[in-house]
Amino acid sequence: TNADLLKRLCEKSIDDYNQENKTELEFVKPLYANFHSASGVMFLITFQVKDPVDNLTKEFQARVHYSYVDKSNFVFCRPKPSPDVSTDQDSLGDAEENAKKQRLE
């Protein structure tokens, strides 16, 4: 089901995050997700994790390109930015921004 797929994508995202950041966050539940077609499906997921260090729940975001024919690409997993943090810049980084500028010139 869709709920099972979201759960698997969230769990893989937080597992990758834990390995990269040497943390032990535990997946709790997906909160909401958006998606669009992109040679598969690009998921933008917000989910809840539990931090065993302080026993608090926190919101995380993940962007995952889910492919029907190839390996899925876990683009990023990060703590959800606070509302006072500007998110005008796409989280994919400077390389994509530079490519956009070149196309516009």
Image (cartoon, grey):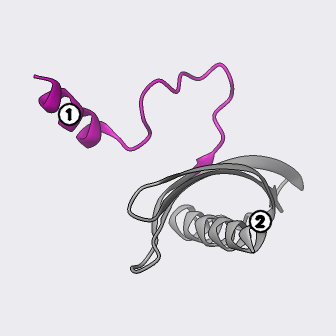
Q: How crowded is mark 2: few (under 14 residues within 10 Å), some or many (20 or more)?
A: many
Query: In front: 8, or 84?
Result: 8
Q: Which residue is drawn at 77% across and 68% down?
A: 3
Q: What element carries label 1?
A: helix
Q: How crowded is mark 1: few (under 14 residues within 10 Å), some or many (20 or more)?
A: few
Give the number of the disc on residue 61.
none
Magenta stretch: give its range.
78-105
Give the residue at mark 2.
Answer: 27
| Label 2 vs 1, first from the N-terminus | 2
Q: Which of marks 2 and 1 is in front?
A: 1
Query: In front: 35, or 90?
Result: 35
Is the N terminus in the top left, top right, bottom left or bottom right quadrant?
bottom right
Q: Which residue is drawn at 77% across and 65% down?
A: 27
Three-letter amino acid code at the position of disc 2 = Phe
Q: Where is residue 89 in the image (x, y as percent from the top left)?
A: 42, 28
Q: Quadrant of residue 39?
A: bottom left
Three-letter amino acid code at the position of disc 1 = Asn
Give the residue at mark 1.
Answer: 98
Q: In which quarter of the image is residue 105?
A: top left
Query: In front: 83, or 50?
Result: 83
**Alpha-carbon span between mark 2 and mark 1:** 34 Å
Locate residue 39 relative to residue 3 in the image: left or right. Answer: left
